[in-house]
Image (spheres, grey):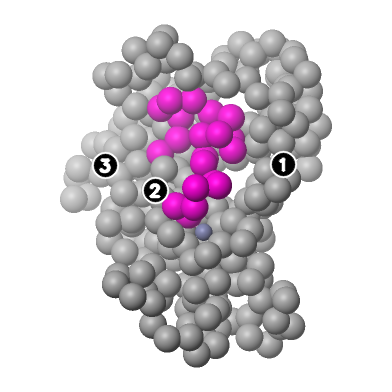
């Protein structure tokens, strides 16, 4: 396993990095630049280089800046919709180099490629109700993107008004177990639901949504043998975020 991973790491070269079109200076680009300025210095760098035609995403800072710039375009309505045509389909048909992994809820209102104004082959996405990373299948899916595809950022994306988190709160409050296998995706959210019980009832849902995203983020950061060493070396990062259904904004969580 270790040898395989090591050999795969040799593919972490510039040539395998995902190149993307920043595009010319457009209204969307300017809006994106101003909106991401508060995220990080890297975000400002991306905004400042908005006249650049291509830019490599080969570190977690640039990956996060690209995600947030795309979300700012989505919020403003000034989307670029790049990488969604026949040229892009052909370009990535042999191999994929998605720069980021998104672990999001299956909720029909949370569609990562749309929310981040990204294209085909850009994002490696694991979706499960409640955006939890506790099962081997989800963990392995994310590990594969990191070790074999060269993704450099993992974002755990919770969202406003999440039904899975509501169900977890209901469970804590004594609701009967849900039917079928529904409880399987509710159970991993229980710790987050329990952690917000001292809050006023009208604040518990959003607090639990955010805590659940943070919990999954912490779990992924500690995951041996693939993700944790990459975090330690600074090659990969994991962040937690929450998507607002009405505004379309993605808020980074500490
Ligand atoms: Zn949800």
Q: Earlier in the sequence, mark 1 or mark 3?
A: 3
Question: Dot 3 corresponds to which residue?
Answer: 6
What is the CA distance from the residue labelled 3 to the residue labelled 2? 24 Å
Q: Residues within 10 Å of mark 1 (few under 14, many from 20)?
A: few
Question: Dot 1 corresponds to which residue?
Answer: 40
Residue 162 picture location, percent across and down: 56, 62
Q: Is residue 20 visible?
A: yes
Was residue 120 drawn as part of the magenta stretch in this picture? yes
Judge by depth and name the residue closer to the eye, 246 or 142: 246
What is the CA distance from the residue labelled 1 to the residue labelled 2? 26 Å
Q: Helix, strand or loop at disc 1?
A: loop
Q: Nearer the viewer, mark 1 or mark 3?
A: 1
Identified at 50% across, 47% down, the residue is: 108
Identified at 47% across, 19% down, the residue is: 84
Query: Which range of residues does the magenta coloring cover?
Result: 105-124
Residue 75 picture location, percent across and down: 71, 36
Residue 65, located in which quarter of the rendered image?
top right
> Which numbered marker is on residue 126?
2
Q: Earlier in the sequence, mark 3 or mark 2?
A: 3
What is the CA distance from the residue labelled 1 to the residue labelled 3? 30 Å
Q: Earlier in the sequence, mark 1 or mark 2?
A: 1
Q: Helix, strand or loop at disc 2?
A: strand
Residue 150, located in which quarter of the rendered image?
top left
> In the figure, is residue 75 to the left or right of 57?
right
Judge by depth and name the residue closer to the eye, 86 or 251: 86
Was residue 239 drawn as part of the magenta stretch in this picture? no
């Amino acid at each position: 396993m270790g040898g395989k991973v090591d050999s795969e790491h040799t593919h972490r070269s510039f040539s395998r990095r995902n190149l993307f079109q920043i595009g010319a200076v457009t209204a969307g680009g300017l809006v994106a630049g101003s909106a991401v300025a508060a995220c990080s210095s890297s975000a400002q760098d991306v905004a400042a280089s908005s006249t650049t035609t291509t830019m490599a995403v080969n570190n977690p800072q640039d990956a996060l800046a690209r995600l947030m710039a795309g979300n700012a375009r989505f919020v403003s309505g000034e989307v670029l919709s790049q990488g969604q045509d026949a040229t892009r389909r052909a370009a990535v048909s042999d191999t994929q180099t998605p720069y980021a992994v998104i672990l999001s809820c299956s909720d029909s209102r949370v569609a990562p490629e749309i929310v981040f104004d990204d294209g085909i082959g850009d994002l490696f996405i694991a979706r499960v109700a409640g955006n939890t990373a506790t099962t081997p299948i989800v963990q392995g899916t994310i590990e594969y993107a990191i070790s074999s595809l060269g993704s450099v950022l993992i974002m755990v994306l919770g969202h406003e008004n999440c039904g899975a988190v509501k169900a977890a709160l209901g469970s804590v409050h004594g609701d009967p177990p849900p039917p079928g296998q529904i409880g399987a995706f509710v159970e991993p959210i229980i710790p987050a639901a329990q952690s917000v019980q001292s809050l006023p009832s009208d604040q518990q849902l959003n607090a639990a949504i955010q805590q659940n995203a943070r919990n999954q983020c912490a779990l992924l950061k500690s995951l041996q043998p693939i993700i944790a060493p990459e975090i330690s070396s600074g090659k990969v990062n994991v962040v937690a975020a929450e998507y607002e259904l009405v505004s379309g904004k993605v808020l980074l969580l500490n």
